[in-house]
Image: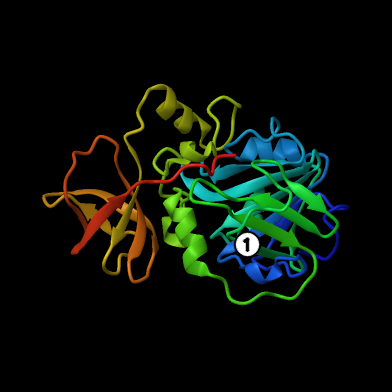
């Protein structure tokens, strides 16, 4: 179901990757690659999201946002997203690499008698720029008529995400810059083949504080909590550069055996990749297939 209207009067939203075109810095903004969004609206919106998603939605203050994830009952990550609490009965999910319609169809199976709606927001635009937000800061959302602004920046520099109800679609996105920023800060970009393969710990979602081990039950919570409290997290994310084509799903080898797997990549003159690897691995040369890998440090500052 598509929605055409005003975020100020509706409660839970699903968005598609579009763009804002009416700010003084409009020339700096472009359509964000492979982001989409969903709206949850109704008196049970917060309680429903709290029970389904891995982070604490009840404890999130209205007007703020955080990173969150939806897991399978076996504790594998289906999707990573930014969850905005516009009001106690109005949530907005900005999804990464997960089609909004598909996400909603899956999530609706668990609504049962809850009083809420999930709708696709088709006429709003999602855009971004590597500049300071005008009004948003950290986890604080900035809202005005027809527009929502988020501070998406980290230690790699400023970044602003905007969701707007009017304005023409912008030019094709600076995909390389935006996606490289995500990967360098350890924000996994999961293709369809990489969904439901990894636990939050394996994707180092603790770096984003994207899940909770204290808030109570949600799908996969038992596995996540047991891994945490028993100290059984054995693998996490590492970032690499490569002078060649590296694909998600490629095994990472230390020369004698496979020790991990590539989960996210950004092809280019130099390919940027995230891999899940043992936390206690020994220093040494690694390769993905026949391509040598050069490890680069993950940047911080995206936690909200």
Asked if residue 255 lies left or right of residue 209, the reply is left
Residue at 49% across, 29% down: 222
| Residue 111 seen by the camera | no
Asked if residue 107 is positioned above or below residue 210 in the image, the reply reads below
Tell me the residue that label 1 is attached to.
Answer: 128
> In this view, which residue lies farthest toward the top?
230
**Which one is nearer the viewer's eye here, 146 or 55?**
146
Quarter occupied by the N terminus: bottom right
Name the outermost residue toward the right: 9
What's the residue at 36%, 25% (across, down)? 231
Q: Which residue lies furthest to the left in this view?
A: 256
Q: In this view, does 232 lie above or below 81?
A: above
Q: Quadrant of residue 304?
A: top right
**Residue visible at 53% across and 51% down in the picture:** 157
Q: Where is residue 247 in the image (x, y as percent from the top left)?
A: 33, 64
- Mark yes or no: residue 222 visible: yes
Residue at the spot x=72%, y=59% of the render? 163
In the image, residue 31 sits, relative to residue 83, either above or below, namely below
In the displayed structure, 6 sits above or below 139; it is below
Nearer to the camera, 85 or 115: 85
Query: What is the x, y in percent for residue 114?
Result: 77, 41
Which sits in the foreground, 241 or 221? 241
């Amino acid at each position: 179901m598509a929605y055409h209207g005003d975020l100020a009067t509706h409660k839970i939203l699903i968005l598609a990757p579009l763009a804002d075109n009416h700010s003084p810095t409009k020339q700096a903004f472009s359509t964000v690659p492979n982001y989409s969004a969903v709206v949850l609206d109704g008196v049970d919106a917060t309680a429903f999201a709290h029970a389904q998603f891995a982070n604490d939605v009840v404890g999130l203050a209205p007007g703020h946002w955080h990173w969150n994830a939806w897991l399978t009952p076996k504790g594998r990550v289906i999707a990573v997203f930014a969850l905005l609490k516009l009001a106690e009965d109005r949530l907005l999910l900005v999804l990464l690499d997960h089609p909004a319609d598909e996400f909603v169809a899956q999530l609706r199976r668990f609504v049962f008698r809850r009083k809420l709606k999930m709708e696709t927001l088709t006429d709003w635009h999602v855009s971004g720029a590597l500049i300071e937000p005008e009004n948003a800061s950290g986890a604080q959302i900035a809202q005005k008529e027809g527009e929502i602004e988020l501070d998406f920046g980290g230690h790699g520099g400023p970044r602003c995400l905007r969701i707007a109800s009017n304005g023409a679609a912008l030019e094709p996105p600076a995909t390389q810059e935006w996606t490289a920023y995500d990967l360098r800060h350890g924000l996994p970009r999961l293709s369809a083949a990489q969904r439901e393969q990894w636990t939050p710990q394996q994707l180092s979602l603790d770096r984003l504080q994207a899940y909770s081990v204290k808030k109570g039950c949600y799908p996969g919570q038992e596995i996540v909590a047991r891994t945490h409290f028993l100290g059984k997290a054995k693998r996490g994310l590492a970032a690499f550069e490569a002078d060649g084509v590296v694909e998600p799903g490629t095994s990472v080898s230390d020369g004698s055996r496979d020790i991990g797997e590539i989960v996210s990549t950004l092809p280019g003159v130099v390919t940027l990749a995230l891999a899940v690897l043992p936390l206690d691995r020994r220093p040494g040369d690694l390769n993905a297939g026949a391509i040598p890998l050069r490890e680069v440090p993950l940047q911080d500052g995206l936690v909200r």
